[in-house]
Each structure stands twice: as structure tokens, then as C-alpha cells.
Amino acid sequence: MTTQQTAALDKLREQQSGVREHTAPWMVAQQLMDICRHDPASAELILQDLDRPAMSIVEAEKKVKAYADAHKNGSFACVPPDESDRILREFYGLPAMESGEQAGQGAPEEQAGGFLDLMDFLG
């Protein structure tokens, strides 16, 4: 992990400590931490933005909530993980995920025949 990634994670934890655990802004920080762990370039951009109040995890969560409110069905609202990832990447100006990629993805794809090759996890 790079120093930028570590600094971004520290900054996210700092902001996360200012909100109640398991609330929407807290979860936004969790998702941003996953992005930072898997993408050093994104971690650097997030780190630069987090010092600006308008780019805090609370402000980012407002963008996710706006999507949820716009797609509300009765009293139920949900934001799928890939959509939340897209919203956060757009908000922080991060590069888009490659087609078919998911945030936090790291495990090998399932092999033909319905089996995982455990050797893919080693090394």
C-alpha cells in the first residue's frame, strides 16, 4: 500500500469518526476505503478532495441519497453497489471502473463447470 493510500484511509477514518457508526455517510467512507485500497490513483484524488468541506463524506452521501430519492418506490429506496460506486467516482472525479469490474473485486472469476480453482487464490 502506498503512502497516499494510507493517508487517504486515515483521512476517511477521521471523517468517519465524526458520524454515527453504520449511518449512510459512514458507509460512504467504507466504500471509499475499498476504492482507495484497490486503486492508488483514486486514493490520491480522494485524499486531495477530503480537505475541502464541500467534498466530505457527508456531502458525498447527499449525492447517493439524491439518487435513492429519485428512484424511490413507495417508502423503499435502494442504491445498488455499482450505482453507488459510479456516483462516488463521479463526485470525486475518479476514473470509471472498467466494464464488468466491481468495486472491491479481487477474487478470480468462477471457472467453467461451476468450480473455483483454489490455486488462483495463492501466490
Image: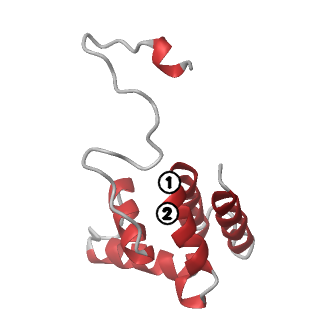
Left or right placement of residue 44 versus residue 76 in this view: right
Q: How is the image coloured?
A: secondary structure
Proximity of marks 2 and 1: CB atoms separated by less than 8 Å: yes
Give the residue type at disc 1.
Asp
Q: Position of residue 36 (x, y in %)?
A: 56, 57
Q: Secondary structure at mark 2?
A: helix
Q: Position of residue 76 (x, y in %)?
A: 35, 65
Quadrant in the rendering for residue 29: bottom right
Out of 41 and 114, give the one closest to the viewer.
41
Left or right placement of residue 104 versus residue 100 in this view: right
Quadrant in the rendering for residue 100: top left
Q: Residue at x 34, y 64 (%)?
A: 86
Q: Which mark is residue 39?
A: 1
Q: Which mark is residue 95?
A: none
Q: Residue at x 58, y 77 (%)?
A: 48
Q: Position of residue 22 (x, y in %)?
A: 63, 61
Instruction: Report if residue 24 is visible in the image.
Output: no
Total labels: the figure holds: 2
Instruction: Report if residue 107 is visible in the image.
Output: yes
Q: Is residue 66 above or below residue 99?
A: below
Q: Residue at x 29, y 51 (%)?
A: 98
Left or right placement of residue 101 versus residue 104 in this view: left
Q: Secondary structure at mark 1?
A: loop
Q: Residue at label 2?
A: 42
- In the picture, the quarter occupied by the C terminus is top right
Give the residue type at disc 2.
Ser
